[in-house]
Image (cartoon, rainbow, N blue to C red):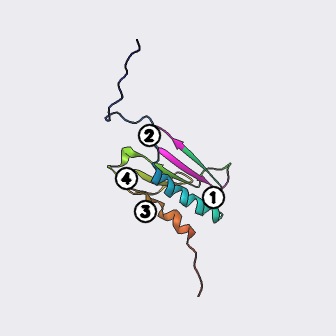
Amino acid sequence: MSAVVPFPRGGAAPSQIGFDRAELARILDLYGRMVAAGHWRDYAIDLGRDAAVFAAFRRTAERPEFRIEKRPALRLRQGQWALVAEHGAVVKRGHELGPVLAPVERKLLKLVED
């Protein structure tokens, strides 16, 4: 006979961190608007044990202009979301995704003359 293997309990740490549907929809909406404005051209997603990272590129062969990182281990400290600039400096960190994306969304605002 075959061996019965029990399902892991809820207390076990996940083997991979990922974005849920609402988070990914918010990030891809911003990405689409930045592509339409001509700022970004490519993206990459890295799903690891410690973090999920969405990287947005101006050109494919460069370093990412911004990285949006989700690190659930930091959710009780300074917040699980971080916006990291091209050279590794943390631009914004927080508990909610919306305010963390605000500096990038400000690039899309244009002044309209009367």
* 55 part of magenta stretch: yes
* Position in image of residue 4 (x %, y %): 37, 19
For the residues marked 1 and 2, what is the alpha-carbon distance in whole angstroms? 26 Å
How many residues crowd around disc 3 within 10 Å: few (fewer than 14), some, or many (20 or more)? Answer: some
Q: Callout 4, which amino acid?
A: Gly
How many residues crowd around disc 2 within 10 Å: few (fewer than 14), some, or many (20 or more)? Answer: some
Indicate which disc residue 99 carries.
3
Q: Residue at x 47, y 47 (%)?
A: 19
Tag 2 or tag 1, which sits nearer the N-term?
A: 1
Left or right: 87 with respect to 9?
Answer: right
How many residues crowd around disc 1 within 10 Å: few (fewer than 14), some, or many (20 or more)? Answer: many
* 65 part of magenta stretch: no
For the residues marked 3 and 1, what is the alpha-carbon distance in whole angstroms? 20 Å
In the image, residue 36 sits, relative to residue 45, either above or below, namely below
Q: Callout 1, which amino acid?
A: Trp
For the residues marked 3 and 2, what is the alpha-carbon distance in whole angstroms? 22 Å
Query: Which residue is under mark 4?
Result: 79
Query: Which residue is under mark 2?
Result: 50
For the residues marked 3 and 4, what is the alpha-carbon distance in whole angstroms? 11 Å
Query: Which residue is under mark 1?
Result: 40
Tag 2 or tag 4, which sits nearer the N-term?
A: 2
Tag 4 or tag 1, which sits nearer the N-term?
A: 1
How many residues crowd around disc 4 within 10 Å: few (fewer than 14), some, or many (20 or more)? Answer: some
The part of the chain drawn in magenta is 46-59
The image quadrant of residue 97 is bottom left
Left or right: 73 with respect to 56?
Answer: left
* Position in image of residue 92 (x %, y %): 45, 58
Does residue 97 appear anywhere in the picture? yes
